Image (cartoon, rainbow, N blue to C red):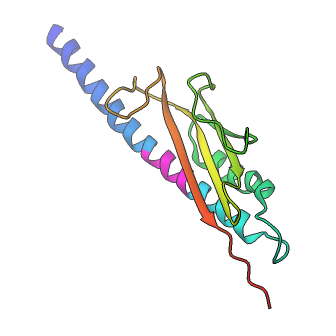
Amino acid sequence: MVEFALVFALVLLLVLGVAQTGLYAVERSVAYDSDEAGVMAATGAASSPTGGPATQSVAGVVEPLLDRGLIGATAAEMAPSGGVCPALSGSWPVGTVYVCSYQPTAGTVAVTVRGWVPALVPPGFGLGQSRAGALPLDITEVAHVATFAP
């Protein structure tokens, strides 16, 4: 019984760790794809040759994609502060991933997906930032705006 208890705990930790690694890989992939879709929406929605990127349309594109692909987390819009998106903070709630878009320079647009997704096993296995019961998502995509005029 003692041997079974010791081995079972290790096997359970191993199985949950493998499952968490797979889930985290899927969630990061969804976040990257959603971020890229937001940049495409912002750069492709300029209304005129002199107009800037449509950063206000990004959340409407990115949030539904994140909500469908994140497990145990939801997407929310975050406004830029001082012309940039706030850095990932340990005080943000676990299970909320924020979408923020802004113009870093004229002719470019940046979309950021940041937040904490729930973890099955305690992180701290060399994944960088760690927080009890959560894994970080911190993805930024920057693109140049190209407007074609006749």
Q: Quadrant of the N terminus?
A: top left
Front-lying residue, 66 or 148: 148
Of helix, strand and loop, which mostly describes the magenta segment? Answer: helix
Residue 57 forms part of the magenta stretch? no
Quarter that holds the C terminus: bottom right
Quadrant assignment, res 57: bottom right
Q: Nearer the viewer, residue 144 or 45?
A: 144
Q: Tell me the quarter of the picture where residue 116 sits.
A: top right
Q: Position of residue 43 (x, y in %)?
A: 70, 67
Q: Residue at x 62, y 48 (%)?
A: 112
Q: What range of the chain is rendered magenta?
A: 25-32
Q: Is residue 82 left or right of residue 125?
A: right
Instruction: Count the marks.
Output: 0
> Where in the figure is residue 13, as x and y percent of width and height?
30, 25
Where residue 20 sits: x, y (%)? 40, 36
Q: Name above or below for residue 145 compared with residue 74.
A: below
User: Is 93 or 108 nearer to us in this picture?
Assistant: 108
